[in-house]
Image (spheres, rainbow, N blue to C red):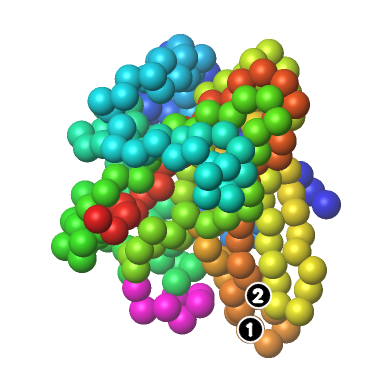
Amino acid sequence: MKSFTDAAAIKPSATSLPARLRRYDWEQAGHELNTRGGTILGGLLSEQECAALISLYDTAELYRNKVIMARHGFGQGEYQYFSYPLPHMVAEIRELTYPYLAPVANQWNAAMNLGIRYPETHQDFIARCHADGQTRPTPLILKYQEDDYNCLHQDLYGEHVFPLQLAVLLSAPERDFSGGEFVLTEQRPRMQSRAEVVPLRQGDGVIFAVHHRPVRGVRGMYRVTMRHGVSQVRSGRRYALGVIFHDAKG
């Protein structure tokens, strides 16, 4: 089975985020999303940017809600949802990545015979969410320590769901933590689930399907169900940024 590959690997410290995003091979990224349900953006954030985001975790006033995963049967570990206004770096990642993903999202919905189409800008899409009562911001930082993990799940939050999302690994594997691999699973009709570990380095982003993606079969296109999670952390501490493009019901 072919493993995930970077859409591009770049040196982020020397370029702005808009320039980094322009340098990715989005045609290759779209191909991997269509065939695998996920793709890696190598070097999306620099080590310094990752450290800056991790440093925000203990600033309570930045967040609207803290979730202790074990209390809800989600796994072990914790995460916090940012409040509006989002930190500049988080808002920039969300707004600037969205236009590259909207064409894939529209292609997927057309293939699955879904009537929903997504506007070109994130501002217009989030206005749609807010008009229908989905006003709570969903970007978050997740924190895992030894023995923590995240069960397989989907981040839906309401009627308006953008079908792709982004996670960025903020900690360095084998330096800050071991274990804690990002996992994607795919469930096709009348078949057992297929799981795949996505290899990430510090600062790498992974774009992946939130809920469903289209797959071509002998009788045409059909939907497969996607879930994601994090395997057990064996040692150390693992932080990640989650960027969900739709907001949640208030």
Q: Is residue 67 above or below residue 114?
A: above
Residue with the mark numbered 2 = 216
Q: Position of residue 34 (x, y in %)?
A: 59, 60
Q: Residue at x 56, y 66 (%)?
A: 213
Q: Amino acid at mark 2?
A: Arg
Cα–Cα span, label 1 and label 2: 5 Å
Taking the image as shown, residue 150 lies to the left or right of residue 72, namely: right
The range drawn in magenta is: 110-116
Q: Nearer the viewer, residue 160 or 10?
A: 160
Q: Amino acid at mark 1?
A: Gly
Q: Residue furthest front?
A: 71
Q: Main secondary structure of the magenta part?
A: loop
Q: Is residue 170 above or below residue 149?
A: above
Do the CB atoms of the residues marked 1 and 2 lie less than 8 Å apart?
yes
Any part of residue 33 in sight: no
Q: Is residue 94 above or below residue 240?
A: below
Q: Residue at x 68, y 87 (%)?
A: 219
Residue with the mark numbered 1 = 220
Taking the image as shown, residue 220 lies to the left or right of residue 195, namely: left
Q: Position of residue 33 (x, y in %)?
A: 58, 55
| Image quadrant in which the C terminus is located | bottom left
